[in-house]
Amino acid sequence: MTQSSGVFIQSTQTDPVVRAGAVIRTEYERLHALLTTLVEPQPTAGAGDGEGSGTGDAEGAPDRATTASPASASVTTTATTGVVGEIRRHLTASAETLHAAAAHAPESRLLVSALRIARSALDRHVDALDAAGGSASATAAAQRVEAVLSVHRAVEEDVLLPALAALPGGVLPPLVADYETLLRGGSLDTSAVIDVRPVPREQRHPLVFARYARLTPGGTFTLVNNHDPKPLHKQFEAAHPGAYTWDYVERGPAKWQIRIGRPNHRPCT
């Protein structure tokens, strides 16, 4: 029993879907915590429980000290702006990495179309949150964002990540690394030339597929290798039939160069 449990733990630790899911889950939980600060009631400026705090008049009218002041509204607006910025950073990072890679594979293209429809609805709610002028409207908008974001998380974690892991080339780990880079405010490598000769063999195909995922329609990059990458070509044909170009620039014997691109047209399905 102990031996089988150990094998299971080891396999889950190295499973790319499990590791990617942990990264995605951590980011969504962080966003959830940020949204909670807008949803939960916040102390109002001037409120207190001492003798000088005030309790209202004899008719039960609220004390002016317990109402929100312009200063407290300003703090709420600042907090809302920060949360909105973090959500938009996450949405951009996932769109430019995970979604971009899946959008050009026949098996996951419709899934990404559905995610983009949900993203449009999410964007509208985020815009409403950004435009919320008072704490009450910000709270309602934050609740709507949180609800749609929860659905987005479930689809990405339970459907999108396994779909990416099933694509040829082992593309999921480098895509998640790119996602984390964008979350940290970094930029992705868009080099026109990728020389994989000094790269360990097991890392070459994922590196190339991740670079392809960052191409815009009509974009290209040149792969430099020390042999004809026929297995890589077969993987491209399996993962992106009709959605890539493959042109030999140099054919050995010691150095091979292939220009890989994404055509402007959409492949027929």
Image (cartoon, rainbow, N blue to C red):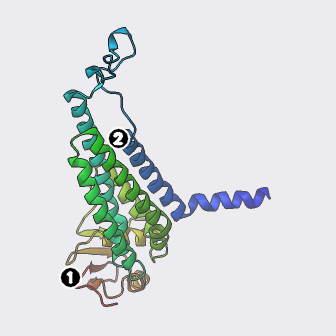
Categorize mark 2 by other alpha carbons within 10 Å: few (<14), some (14-19), many (20+): many
| Identity of the residue drawn at 30% across and 83% down | 244
Task: Name the residue that disc number 2 marks.
Answer: 38
Where does residue 191 sit, x and y in percent of width and height?
A: 24, 65
Decide: is 155 above or below 219. above
Q: Nearer the viewer, residue 74 or 201?
A: 74
Residue 231 location, quadrant: bottom left
Where residue 150 sits in the image (x, y, percent)? 43, 57
Mark 1, residue position: 264
The quadrant in which the N terminus is found is bottom right
Q: Nearer the viewer, residue 32 or 70?
A: 70
Q: Residue at x 21, y 42 (%)?
A: 133
Residue 165 image offset from top left, x and y in percent: 48, 71
Residue appearing at x 21%, y 75% in the figure: 219
Q: Quadrant of residue 253?
A: bottom left
Task: Tell me if mark 1 has few (under 14), some (14-19) or many (20+) residues whose alpha carbon lies within 10 angstroms of its own.
Answer: few
- Please indicate, yes or no, whether residue 188 appears anywhere in the rendered image: no
Tell me which label, 2 or 1, sits earlier in the chain.
2
